[in-house]
């Protein structure tokens, strides 16, 4: 089991304070959401947890600061799915893209076919990842990370670009892994959290780089609360 403790986390990028004094503890196995408007700092927070950007304060996994892990050791532990899939792609084919992490971490290919079938991307394997449609790229990007079966997974807006089939697959993945892994999902869209609410442990509301509140899944129905931090409430669409 894993415990991720974020203590007094501050991130400054190009002279601007982006994250200000974040304190959160995540425990596995669980599914958590980080909810916040555009620019509130969600992606920055996930990037800090994946040790992709410099930060002040501490991010500790099982009592060891993430900056003290070897890069490969941390990659075996944490998977990070980029909000924009194109940031993560660099191989010539989808097949190579998905297999890269397996080769790099010295893992067996056994999960490859399972993931390809699960995300329904076998027809894309010989394509260049850079020529894919938005939703296809999202499926490949998620597959290229979770194929390594890491115990801690960070998803940045996984529902964006997804059609009905794509949403059902990602929701299925979240529901069936919430009791096995530590899943942290960042989004500006409360609908996805609401859809999997029975599997969600806690939701952190982020606003201007601060955690302003920790809420339970039932509070996702509080439109006034969500509107107060610039989130589109669930009932906004059909009002
Ligand atoms: N390298 C950088 N230099 C300056 N500002 C940055 C840098 N990276 C991010 N920011 C700013 O930090 C803030 C938080 O960005 P972040 O990407 O974490 O937001 P977000 O909550 O993920 O937003 P979105 O919902 O649009 O994905 C934004 O105002 C962004 O413009
Ligand atoms: Mg973002």
Image (tube, rainbow, N blue to C red):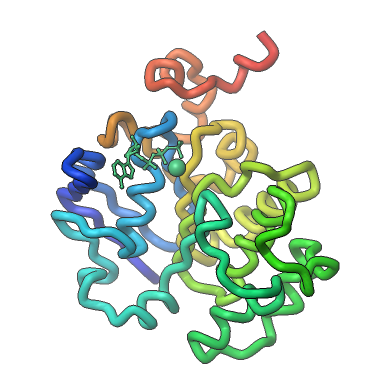
Q: Residue at x 34, y 79 (%)?
A: 71
Residue 25: where, in percent of width, then height?
A: 29, 53
Q: Is residue 162 left or right of residue 62?
A: right
- The answer to whether residue 102 is above or below residue 31 is below
Count of residue discs: 0
Q: Residue at x 33, y 62 (%)?
A: 52
Where residue 118 sits, quadrant-wise, is bottom right
Most distant residue in the right direction: 123
Question: Quarter of the image containing the N terminus?
Answer: bottom left
Q: Residue at x 31, y 64 (%)?
A: 51
Q: Is residue 197 left or right of residue 225?
A: right
Residue 66: where, in percent of width, then height?
A: 26, 69
Q: Residue at x 41, y 18 (%)?
A: 225
* Quarter of the displayed picture in which ligand 2 can be seen: top left
Residue 3: where, in percent of width, then height?
A: 32, 64
- The answer to whether residue 239 is above or below residue 87 is above
Q: Nearer the viewer, residue 99 or 28?
A: 99
- The answer to whether residue 117 is above or below residue 218 is below
Where residue 192 sits, quadrant-wise, is top right
Q: Is residue 210 left or right of residue 119?
A: left
Residue 194: where, in percent of width, then height?
A: 59, 34
Question: Quarter of the image containing the C terminus?
Answer: top right
Q: Nearer the viewer, residue 90 or 154?
A: 90
């Amino acid at each position: 089991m894993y415990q991720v403790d974020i203590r007094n986390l501050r991130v400054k990028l190009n002279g601007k304070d982006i994250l200000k004094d974040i304190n959160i503890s995540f425990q596995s196995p669980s599914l958590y959401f980080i909810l916040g408007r555009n620019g509130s700092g969600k992606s920055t927070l996930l990037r800090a947890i994946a040790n992709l950007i410099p930060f002040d304060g501490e991010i500790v996994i099982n009592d060891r600061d993430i900056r003290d892990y070897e890069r490969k050791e941390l990659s075996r532990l944490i998977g990070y799915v980029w909000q924009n899939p194109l940031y993560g792609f660099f191989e010539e084919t989808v097949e190579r893209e998905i297999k890269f992490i397996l080769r790099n971490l010295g893992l067996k290919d056994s999960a490859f076919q399972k993931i390809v079938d699960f995300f329904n991307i076998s027809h894309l394997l010989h394509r260049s990842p850079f020529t894919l449609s938005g939703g296809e790229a999202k499926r490949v990007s998620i597959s290229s990370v979770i194929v390594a079966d890491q115990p801690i997974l960070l998803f940045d807006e996984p529902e964006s670009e997804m059609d009905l089939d794509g949403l059902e697959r990602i929701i299925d993945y979240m529901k069936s892994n919430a009791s096995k892994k530590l899943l942290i999902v960042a989004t500006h869209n409360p609908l996805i959290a609401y859809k999997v609410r029975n599997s969600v442990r806690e939701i952190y509301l982020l606003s201007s780089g601060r955690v302003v509140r920790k809420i339970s899944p039932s509070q996702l129905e509080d439109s006034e609360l969500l509107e107060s931090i610039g989130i589109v409430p669930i009932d906004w669409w059909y009002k």
